[in-house]
Structures are given as structure tokens and as C-alpha cells.
Image (tube, rainbow, N blue to C red):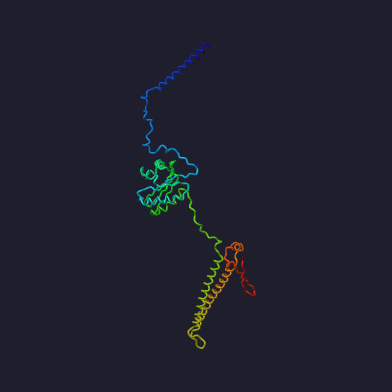
Amino acid sequence: MTRLRSVLNLLMALMIMSAFSFVGVSQAVALDDDADMSFGEDDVEPIDEDDMTFAPTDVAPVTKKSGEKLTLAVVAIPSADLDAQDRIALQRELMSAMESVPGFAVYGDDVVLPGLEDRGSETCVREPLCLSSVGRNGGVERILVARVSRGEGGYRLNVDLFDVNERLFLRYHAANNLGGFSNVVEAVRPAVNDVFNIRVPRGKDEFVDDNSVDIQRIMAYSTAALSVASLGVGIYFGMEVGDMQESFDAQPKQNGKYTTLTQVKAERLIRDMESKAVTANVFYGLSAALAVGSVLLFVLEGDEADEQASIEQRPSWNQVRFVPSVSRDAVGIGAHLKF
């Protein structure tokens, strides 16, 4: 029992000595001279803000209150393929196209273009960090960038929407193979509508409303026209028959016989006259039938439901309806008026 107590006391002494040794080493390290450090105090000083490519506030997100409009700068980027006048025309068209886009407070190129030109506009518009820095310096949250280049196929228009706070390109649109600068200007508005997901209302659908077209009246006029054409064909063949008959009657005769016609020629001439007479009669009959059909189409009523639905839209003279009456003894036409 005495031996066990001695061992415990020894362990306690060792633990106390270890604790004092740890405290002593910690104090020694804390009080050690700075000359033994691997870096100096200057190495931990903050970098001068003038040497930074973007301001410290560029990394702080901007929060918008509900209902406030986002600020947006619109800029047409100068390029070697775009002279000064064309760039101004492109800028104006961009501003005009943005008038139909809701939810934005739109600014011109004066808030971001100087910063872009200082950094190299053609390069900066492709680098999110650079473009974000320019946007923050200009005090806007979005930048709408339009770039024009020219190649073998013609002009190319690129329209990009950039989020300044998130340093992210949100949407883009590209139009290729534009024949001339006028085509570039014409492509701006569709490009802006596509970038902001604006659907232009379509024009009136080009379809034929059955209720607006009087099919019966069209058929009536068409039948009347065919009747007149058939009558003309019948008259033509009838006149030919008359000419042939006159020519046949004018042949010289002696003792009641034709002196210049053989029996075969006479029979052939008679058959030709009979054939053309039959053709003329057929067209006369067809013309008469078409004329009757045309009259019936003009005067017969349509469907009762359609009549009742459209009666208020018709002029008073068109509300009079005629109905043919046919019997063994007589043929007539009756008329009635709906009001």
C-alpha cells in the first residue's frame, strides 16, 4: 500500500512539472525577437487602393428595395468596323428599343463608355471583372452592350446583358450575315426584345371567317358567270350553223339538183351542220340550267340559325327573301321580309 502511494505521488509530481514547462515555453515563444520571423511587418500591410484593379466595395452586393427600378447603362462599343456616325446611330436605336422594356432606369453610354475606353473597350467588355468595375464606377447595376464586327459573310451584331453586382453575363443575342449597316440597325430591336424576353404581339391572324364570307352569294355569281359563258359558246356554234346553212343554200341548182355538190359532200355538210347545231343546243340548255341555278342561289334562304344570327347585321333591302313556287299549272316567285 505504501509502494502504491509512492508511485501516485511520483506521477503527480511529473504532471505538475510538465505543466510548468509548457507555460514557460509558451512565454518564451511569445517574447521571442521579431528578427527570427520569416516575414516582416510590412508584408501584412494592406495594398494601396490605387494599385487595385477594382474598388473594395466591388465585392459587396447591392440590395434593391422591392418595386425599385434597376439602373441600366446602354452602350454601343466603338470598333474598327464601325465609324463614329454609325456608332451614334446604333446607340440611338438601342436607346429607342429600351423604351419598350419595363423595370429599368436607362442611362446612356456616357456613364460607362469613358471607363471602358480607359481600360480598352473591346477587351474590357469580354472580361466580367473589368466590366463590373466600370459598371460600379458608373453607378449602374446592369449594362447592355452592343458590339458590331464585320466578316466575309457581312456584319455581325452581338447584344449582351451584364449583371454588374454578380459579374455575370445574363443573356446574349447574336445576329449574323447582315448585309449592310441598315440591316444591323433593323436587327437591334429584335435583339433587345430577345435579350429581355419580350414577345412582340402578333398581327391579326390571317384566316377566313366563314361567317364573314357569303359562300352562297359567291356560288350564285359564279353560276351566273358560267351561264353567260355557256350562252356565248352556244351563240358561237349557232352562228356557225347559220353560216353553213347559208353557204349550203347558195349552191347552184338545176332542175332542183345541186350542180357543184355530190351526194357524199352534201351529206357530210349536212352532218356537220347537225353536229354543230346539237352542240349549240347543248350549251343553250346548259346556260339556261346555270341561269336557273344562279337565280335560285340568289333568292333561296340559307340555314335558319345563320339567318337569325345575322339578320340584325344585314341592310333592310337584304332582309327580303324570295322563294320560287313551282306547280303543274304555274311557276312563280314569292317574297317575304323578316324584321
Does 219 sit above or below residue 100? below
Q: Residue at x 55, y 66 (%)?
A: 217
Q: Nearer the viewer, residue 79 or 69?
A: 69
Residue 148 image offset from top left, x and y in percent: 38, 49
Residue 24 image offset from top left, x and y in percent: 42, 19
Outermost residue toward the top in this view: 2
Q: Answer left or right for 9 relative to 47.
A: right
Does 225 sit above or below residue 31? below
From the image, which quarter does the C terminus lie in?
bottom right
Q: Answer left or right for 174 relative to 204.
A: left
Residue 87 image offset from top left, x and y in percent: 37, 50
Residue 96 image offset from top left, x and y in percent: 43, 51
Report the label total.
0
Q: Nearer the viewer, residue 14 or 309?
A: 309
Q: Residue at x 40, y 38 (%)?
A: 55
Q: Nearer the viewer, residue 281 or 212?
A: 212
